[in-house]
């Protein structure tokens, strides 16, 4: 197989569209607003057809590496580009590629995740007992304080520029929030996350209310919303199921470090 960087977004879109839920993050980051942060690599068959795509996304404090494609194509792609990957990065990867990745990186800390998704027509509104408001740059300090309770968060202040962060305040304190990782009106998809509630306010349905407000707003722009949740986190999965999210696929997620 031939391995090369891919610059044609329409070629990438056509390939990723075969599973727009499984490739939701890649489709989101394909939007021009994220272009400066993205490096795309592809493995091509002898006939020139894409077999796999790997995105190195540098818009986070820790770079992200997102893989999508056939096992054969991803094997060839990873063997070729692994020497050029960052020494430390956040990864989304299928179980079939774990053994190859583990030959060069420590992967013991990866978590088994579920990709969930919802289409506009599947959405079920959730009643709100609290006022849910849009969160902006003026709330950056409060957000950073809240996310300190969740060290695995992937929040970056620039994400607020999307306009799609929603939160709940109690006595002026930000206690719950939900936002977007990637959003592409052009390609019709959003990947949401960074959904957290202050530990002192859990059990009141605040995350569900924030997520509901976020999803409703996104459905004015895109027809598909996705998220990731840890496979064993049954409480969170039930929260998202209340809104109409359904399971799509399993994969592994987390930070890896180059061995040796």
Image: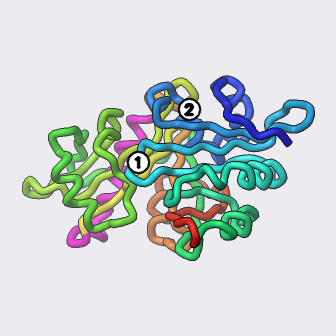
* Colour option used: rainbow
Q: In this view, does 8 lie to the left or right of 35?
A: right
What numbered label is drawn on residue 121?
Answer: none
Q: Does the magenta stretch include residue 143?
A: no
Residue 225 versus residue 171 in the image, above or below: above
What numbered label is drawn on residue 60?
Answer: 1
Residue 39: quarter of image: top right
Depth check, front residue: 211 or 51: 51
What numbered label is drawn on residue 30?
Answer: 2
Q: In this view, does 203 lie to the left or right of 93?
A: left
Q: Which residue occupies 84% across, 52% down? A: 72
Residue 116 versus residue 50 in the image, above or below: below
Helix, strand, or loop for circle 1?
loop
Whether residue 71 is visible, yes or no, is yes
Helix, strand, or loop for circle 2?
loop
Q: Residue 151: x and y, percent?
A: 34, 66
Whether residue 241 is visible, yes or no, is no
Q: In this view, does 171 lie to the left or right of 167?
A: left
Which badge, 1 or 2, comes first in the chain's sequence?
2
Q: Which residue occupies 12% across, 56% down? A: 173
Residue extent of the magenta highlight: 199-219
* Image quadrant where one finds the C terminus: bottom right
Q: In this view, does 145 lie to the left or right of 231?
A: left
Q: Distance between the residues labelled 1 and 2?
A: 15 Å
SS majority, magenta: helix
Residue 225 versus residue 228 in the image, above or below: above
Depth check, front residue: 111 or 248: 111
Q: Residue 232: x and y, percent?
A: 54, 74
CA neighbours of label 2 inside 10 A, class few (<14), some (14 to 19), many (20+): many
The count of marks equals: 2
CA neighbours of label 1 inside 10 A, class few (<14), some (14 to 19), many (20+): some
């Amino acid at each position: 197989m031939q391995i090369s960087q891919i610059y044609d977004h329409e070629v990438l879109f056509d390939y990723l569209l075969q599973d727009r839920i499984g490739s939701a993050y890649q489709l989101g980051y394909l939007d021009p607003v994220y272009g400066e942060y993205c490096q795309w690599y592809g493995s091509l068959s002898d006939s020139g057809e894409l077999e796999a795509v790997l995105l190195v996304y540098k818009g986070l404090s820790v770079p992200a590496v997102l893989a999508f494609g056939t096992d054969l194509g991803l094997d060839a792609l990873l063997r070729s580009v692994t020497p050029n990957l960052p020494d430390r990065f956040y990864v989304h990867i299928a179980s079939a590629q774990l053994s190859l990745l583990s030959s060069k990186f420590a992967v013991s800390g990866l978590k088994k995740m579920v990709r969930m998704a919802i289409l506009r027509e599947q959405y079920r509104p959730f009643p709100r007992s609290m006022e849910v408001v849009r969160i902006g740059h003026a709330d950056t300090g409060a957000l950073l304080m809240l996310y300190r309770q969740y060290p695995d968060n992937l929040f970056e202040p620039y994400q607020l520029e999307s306009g799609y962060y929603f939160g709940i305040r109690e006595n002026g304190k930000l206690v719950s929030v939900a936002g977007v990782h990637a959003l592409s009106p052009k390609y019709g998809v959003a990947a949401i996350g960074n959904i957290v509630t202050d530990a002192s306010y859990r059990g009141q349905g605040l995350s569900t209310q924030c997520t509901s407000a976020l999803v409703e707003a996104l459905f004015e722009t895109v027809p598909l919303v996705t998220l990731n949740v840890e496979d064993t986190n049954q409480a969170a999965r039930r929260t998202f199921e209340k809104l109409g999210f359904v399971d799509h696929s399993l994969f592994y997620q987390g930070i890896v470090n180059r061995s040796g």
